[in-house]
Image (cartoon, rainbow, N blue to C red):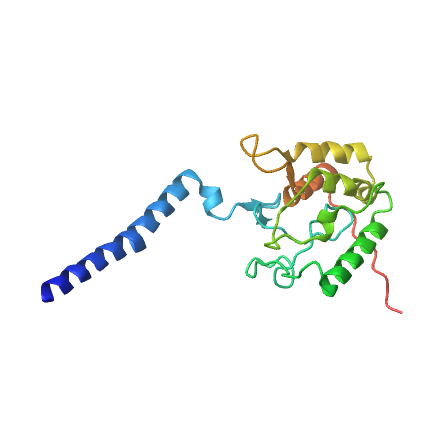
Amino acid sequence: MTKTLVLALRAAAVTLVLTGLVYPLAVWAVAQAAFTRQADGSIVIGEDGAEVGSDLLGQAFTDPGYVQPRPSAAGSGYDATASSGSNLGPTSKALRDRATADVARLAKDNPGATSPVPAELVTASGSGLDPHLSPESVEWQVPRIAAARHVAEDRVRAVVAEHVEGRDLGVLGEPRVNVLALNLSLDRHFGRPAPRARIPPK
């Protein structure tokens, strides 16, 4: 019995070292060597050299001069430490009220839009951190962005077209636009939008 116990402990120790130490270190080394940026979180660096976000994580943009993302139910919103959906079903009054309010807000903020509010802009993703929008949802926002930046809509559309990502391997997924990358590109082309005037309290 002692011999069996020793063999079992030896096997457990070898397995622990191989799967708990050697394998993770090997994967880490390969990732750092071959995919350094992705392994470090796909961090995006702004023109001033500061980190401004990640290609993989959505974040809030509320200024009218920027493409605005899908709503987020992650924590208090776009919280990478609390990735989640709202878990509210189609019969939920809270979900219906939130979506109705979002539709009203978007319609008010986008008077130049010629079609109904895209469903994508009022529905949160399962993670709450989706960094992409469909080209159609971005196009819907172009009139507002162009007006806020005082440029022609066609100039904004040209920048959007540069950032449309096709299907993976030509067949997987749908065309999409990374919101953070596009907003940074809008700033590079047209400068940052002027800050909105603050309305003094009554």
> Quick check: 93 above or below 58?
below
Give the image quarter of residue 142.
Answer: top right
Give the image quarter of residue 12.
Answer: bottom left
Percent from the top left, x then y, of residue 157?
A: 75, 34
Q: Position of 36 compared to 3: left or right?
A: right
Give the image quarter of residue 150.
Answer: top right
Residue shown at 67% from the left, 32% from the top: 162
Residue shown at 20% from the left, 57% from the top: 11
Q: In which quadrant is the N terminus drawn?
A: bottom left
Residue shown at 84% from the left, 42% from the top: 113
Q: Nearer the viewer, residue 156 or 18?
A: 18
Q: Residue lying at the far right in this picture: please name it.
A: 202
Percent from the top left, x then y, of residue 127?
A: 59, 54
Q: Which of 178 and 171 is in front in this view?
A: 171
Q: In which quadrant is the C terminus drawn?
A: bottom right
Q: Position of 139 compared to 14: left or right?
A: right
> Quick check: 156 above or below 92?
above
Residue 29 makes an appearance in the image: yes
Residue 68 makes an appearance in the image: no
Q: Residue lying at the far front in this picture: please name it.
A: 91
Residue shown at 10% from the left, 63% from the top: 3
Q: Position of 199 compared to 120: left or right?
A: right
Q: Nearer the viewer, residue 73 or 80?
A: 73
Q: Which of 157 and 19 is in front in this view?
A: 19
Percent from the top left, x then y, of residue 96?
A: 75, 60
Percent from the top left, x then y, of residue 98?
A: 75, 60
How many marks the image carries: the answer is 0
